[in-house]
Image: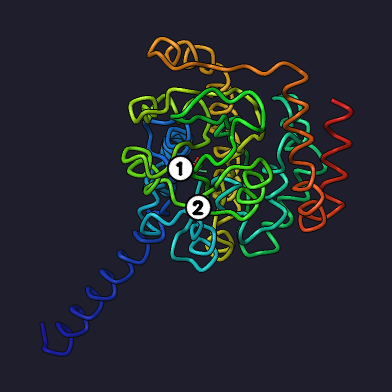
Amino acid sequence: MTLTRSIAHFTAGLAGVALLSVSLSAQARELSVSTVLSDAFPWGQAAEKWAELVEERSDGELTLRVYPNSQLVSGDQTREFSAMRSGLIDAAVGSTINWSPQVPELNLFSLPFFIPDEAAVDAVTGGEAGELVFEAIESRGVMPLAWGENGFRQVSNSRGAISQPADLDGLKIRVVGSPLFQDTFSALGADPTQMSWTDAQPALTTGAVDGQENPLSVFDVARIDQVGQEHLTLWNYMNDPLIFAVNQQVWQSLSEEHQTLLRETAMEAGEWEIAMTREEEGERLAAIRERGVTVTELSDEQYQAFVEATQSVYEKWAPRIGEEVVNAAQAAIDAR
Ligand code: X2X
C-alpha cells in the first residue's frame, strides 16, 4: 500500500466512524422529563409510565429520563414551565398550578369551588375549555400532549377542625407559589404563606405553618399526619390537573412518527394515572382516618359558606384567565 493510499484508507475510516456516531445519536435520543413529585406518588408514576411506554414502542430510539423532586429547577417548581420553554428541560409532567404564573389561563383550575367533581373536571379538560387551555400553552412555546391528575385538593391543619370560613381565621397556611392562592386564603381570613413543596415539609414539621392543602394521595404518601396535621377537611375546593408537555423546538425536531408516539403514550399514561388516582382515594382516606386524623366533611350549607366567602377571588381572576375560557368551562360544567 502506498502512503497516499493508506492515508486515503485511514481518512475513509475516520469518516466511517463519524458517520456511525451521527447515525447512533440520531437513533438513540434521550429527553429529560421534569416532575415535582417522585414515583412514590401517582404524579411521578405517570411520568414513569410514559417513559416505559416510549421505551417499549420506540425500539430504544427514544428514551425519556425522569428527573423528580423539581431537581432540574433546584426545587423551585414555579420555574418549571420557563425552564421547559427555554429548553433547559425537554419535557415535563407538571401541575397547572406551578405553570400558572407563566400561563394565566391555567388559573382556571385554581378558581375556588368552581370545578366541583370528577365529571366536571373531565367535561372541562375534554371539551372546548381544555382545547383553549392547550392553545394557550402552545402559544407560549410549549407543546401540550395530554392530561393527568394530581387530584382534588383538601385542606389540613394542626389546630382544629375546619367546617366554616371562621375556622381558618388567622391560620398560617402554606400555599403554592401562585398569587391566586394568596387571594383565596386571604379571602377566607387565613394567613397564607407561599413556598415550594421542598420547603413546605420542614415548615410543617417545625410548626412555622399551621396548615397546608394538597390532594389525598400527597397527604397519604408524604405522611403529612406525622408532621402534626391532625385535622383534614374534604372540601374539593379545586382539582389539580397535570399536563404532559414537550419543549417546542424539541417537538419540531422529532420525526412525525416520534411525535405521534410521544402523544399517544402520554395520553395512555395520563388516562391510566387519572383512573388510578381516583380509584385509590377511598383506600387512602381510610388509611388516613386509621392513623387518627380527624376528617371533616361539609354539609351543603357549610360548603355554600365557603363558596360565598371566596366569590371575590372568582371576580378578580375570571378576567385574567379570560372570559372565553371561563365561559367554555362553565358551559361544560353545567352540561355534564
Ligand atoms: O407543591 C404542592 O403542593 C404540589 C406538590 O401539590 C404541587 O406541586 C402543586
Quadrant assignment, res 293: top left
Frontmost of labels 1 and 2 is 2
Graded by Cα atoms within 10 Å as few (under 14), some (14 to 19) or many (20 or more), the crowding at tag 1 reads: some
Residue at image point 56% right, 56% down: 255
Return the x and y of residue 48 as percentages of the image width and height.
42, 36
Query: Which residue does the numbered mark 1 point to in the structure image?
Result: 58
Q: Residue furthest bottom?
A: 4
Residue type at numbered disc 2: Gln
Residue at image point 66% right, 40% down: 188
- Looking at the image, is 212 positioned above or below residue 81? above
Q: Quadrant of the N terminus?
A: bottom left
Quadrant assignment, res 121: top right
- Looking at the image, is 150 positioned above or below residue 216? below
Q: What's the mark number on residue 194? A: 2
Return the x and y of residue 321 as percentages of the image width and height.
76, 54
Residue at image point 56% right, 66% down: 249
Q: Secondary structure at mark 1?
A: loop
Q: Is residue 71 left or right of residue 117?
A: left
Q: Secondary structure at mark 2?
A: strand
